[in-house]
Image: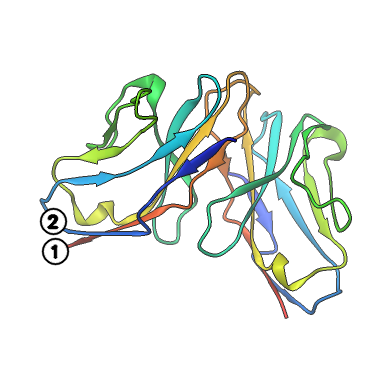
């Protein structure tokens, strides 16, 4: 079974530029998550989708971050304009249902460096 | 406030020594607790969950509601256990995970 795919793996941009990350979850997984992991910290949830609807985006900085999951499969996370503090690894994860089994399947992450 | 605390950033032991990675949580209600692990150059993955009461790769974790703890233990550490370990919790009826800051376990030969 193919795992969660993310691209690009690495991205370096200057502040005030924009960037987009793409995620393809495991086939059949209805729930998709974007997490932000800053160096030395644990992953922090940015947004959760159930199919193509947003379940939780309470910690998404909506003035600069946006995410969509059109057609309930792939998802894109965009940052515009980027700030220095956005430097982090952006992890995409998916799960089969929205119950509390706790098993999220993570991608390899997209490492963003903002200069 | 919902929070997971892992007080140790780094834990170093020799092969064969017992290991305990500490995790304390704060949550109003009945959370589900989990341990996730990230080996070098691999993805973050689930190690074990408290509701399963299972032992995975020799690791166990007991939920202590009185002390609000969920420490991860292994009686005899192996070099291949070297990794980053994250404690996490979720509420009832949700997969949303709140992670701790992680503990890096180093097992020396």
Quadrant of the rendered image containing residue A22: bottom right
Q: Position of residue B16 (x, y in %)?
A: 10, 51
Horizontal arrangement in the rendering, residue A15 relative to residue A92 (left or right): right
Q: Earlier in the sequence, mark 1 or mark 2?
A: 2
Horizontal arrangement in the rendering, residue A107 relative to residue B7 (left or right): right
Q: Position of residue A61 (x, y in %)?
A: 81, 52
Please check whether the numbered discs 1 and 2 fall on a single chain: yes
**How many residues crowd mark 2 within 10 Å: few (<14), some (14–19), many (20+)?**
some
Q: Position of residue B29 (x, y in %)?
A: 54, 20
Q: Nearer the viewer, residue A86 or A108?
A: A86
Vertical arrangement, residue B65 with respect to residue B5, above or below: above
Q: Nearer the viewer, residue B58 or A84?
A: A84
The disc placed on residue A33 is none
Extreme residue in the left direction: B16
Quadrant of the rendered image containing residue A111: bottom right
Residue position for label 2 = B15
CB under 8 Å between callouts 1 and 2? yes
Quadrant of the rendered image containing residue B14: bottom left
Q: Position of residue A32 (x, y in %)?
A: 70, 37
Q: Residue visible at 27% across and 29% down?
A: B55
Could you tell me which quadrant the N terminus of chain A lies in?
A: top right
Could you tell me which quadrant the C terminus of chain A lies in?
A: bottom right
Q: Secondary structure at mark 2?
A: loop
What's the chain of the residue with tag 1? Answer: B
Horizontal arrangement in the rendering, residue A51 relative to residue B94 (left or right): right
Q: Residue visible at 78% across and 45% down?
A: A75
Q: Residue visible at 36% across and 33% down?
A: B69
What's the chain of the residue with tag 2? Answer: B
* Image color mode: rainbow
**How many residues crowd mark 1 within 10 Å: few (<14), some (14–19), many (20+)?**
few
Residue position for label 1 = B109
Q: Secondary structure at mark 1?
A: loop
């Amino acid at each position: 079974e193919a795992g969660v795919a993310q691209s690009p793996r690495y991205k370096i941009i200057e502040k005030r530029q924009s960037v987009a990350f793409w995620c393809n979850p495991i086939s059949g997984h209805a729930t998709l998550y974007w997490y932000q992991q800053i160096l030395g910290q644990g992953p922090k949830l940015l947004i959760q989708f159930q199919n193509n609807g947003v379940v939780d985006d309470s910690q998404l900085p909506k003035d600069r971050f946006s995410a969509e999951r059109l057609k309930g499969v792939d998802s894109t996370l965009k940052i515009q304009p980027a700030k220095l503090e956005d430097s982090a690894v952006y992890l995409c994860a998916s799960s089969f249902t929205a119950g509390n089994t706790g098993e999220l399947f993570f991608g390899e992450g997209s490492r963003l460096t903002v200069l | 406030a919902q929070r997971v605390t892992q007080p140790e950033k780094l834990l170093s032991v020799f092969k064969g020594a017992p290991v305990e990675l500490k995790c304390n949580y704060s949550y109003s209600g009945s959370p589900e607790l989990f341990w996730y692990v990230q080996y070098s150059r691999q993805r973050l993955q689930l190690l074990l969950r408290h509701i399963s009461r299972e032992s995975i790769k020799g690791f166990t974790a007991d939920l202590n509601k009185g002390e609000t703890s969920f420490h991860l233990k292994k009686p005899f550490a192996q070099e291949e256990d070297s990794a980053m370990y994250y404690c996490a919790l979720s509420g009832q009826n949700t997969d949303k995970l709140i992670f701790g800051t992680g503990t890096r376990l180093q097992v020396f030969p």
